Image (cartoon, rainbow, N blue to C red):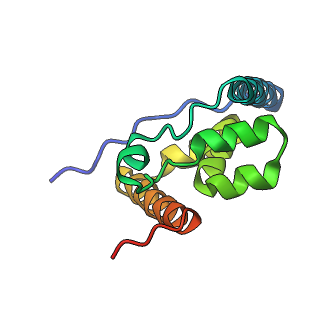
Amino acid sequence: MTAPVQTARPAPGPLRVRLARTALRCLLAATAAVGVAVLHDVHDPGVLCPLRRFTGIPCPACGSTTVFIEAGHAHWSAALTANPVTVIAVLGLLTAPLGSGARWWALTSRRRSAVIATALVVAWVWQLNRLGVHLS
């Protein structure tokens, strides 16, 4: 049996480049959040999640749109309580150029899968509790 092949990752680059990339990502995310908040103020489409709309049971990603709407209105605690897993994932993506991306890809695929699976379970339990759904 052969050992898994590790692909080489390029050096992250100078700090100023990584900071500029992070700032650009944050600016784009903030612009998107404000845009989503404005669109929501003009027209609230109601529940977007098909699973929740048709069964009443939220999915692990439920609350993710609300995270961006609340962030766009600068309601940080409301954004965090809508779906903290989404907030953590977005922060990880935004800060990837500062090193979190390299740390993520340094994990084995099995470890990354376990982190994602755990995050989905935590998010789903959070949503079930937040929306008062009791599966029995």
> Seen in the image, is 80 located left or right of residue 50?
right
Coordinates of residue 80 in the picture (x, y in percent): 71, 54
Q: What residue lies at 61% left-to-right and 54% top-to-bottom?
A: 83
Where, by quadrant of the figure, is residue 69 drawn? top right
Q: What residue lies at 49% left-to-right and 48% top-to-bottom?
A: 61
Outermost bottom residue: 136
* On-image quarter of the C terminus: bottom left
Q: Nearer the viewer, residue 13 or 117?
A: 117
Q: What residue lies at 75% left-to-right and 53% top-to-bottom?
A: 78
Where, by quadrant of the figure, is residue 31 drawn? top right
How many discs mark residues in the rendered view? 0
* 121 to 97, vertically: above or below: below
Q: Nearer the viewer, residue 78 or 7?
A: 78
* On-image quarter of the N terminus: bottom left
Q: Nearer the viewer, residue 59 or 12?
A: 59
> Seen in the image, is 2 located left or right of residue 61?
left
> Seen in the image, is 30 located left or right of residue 11?
right
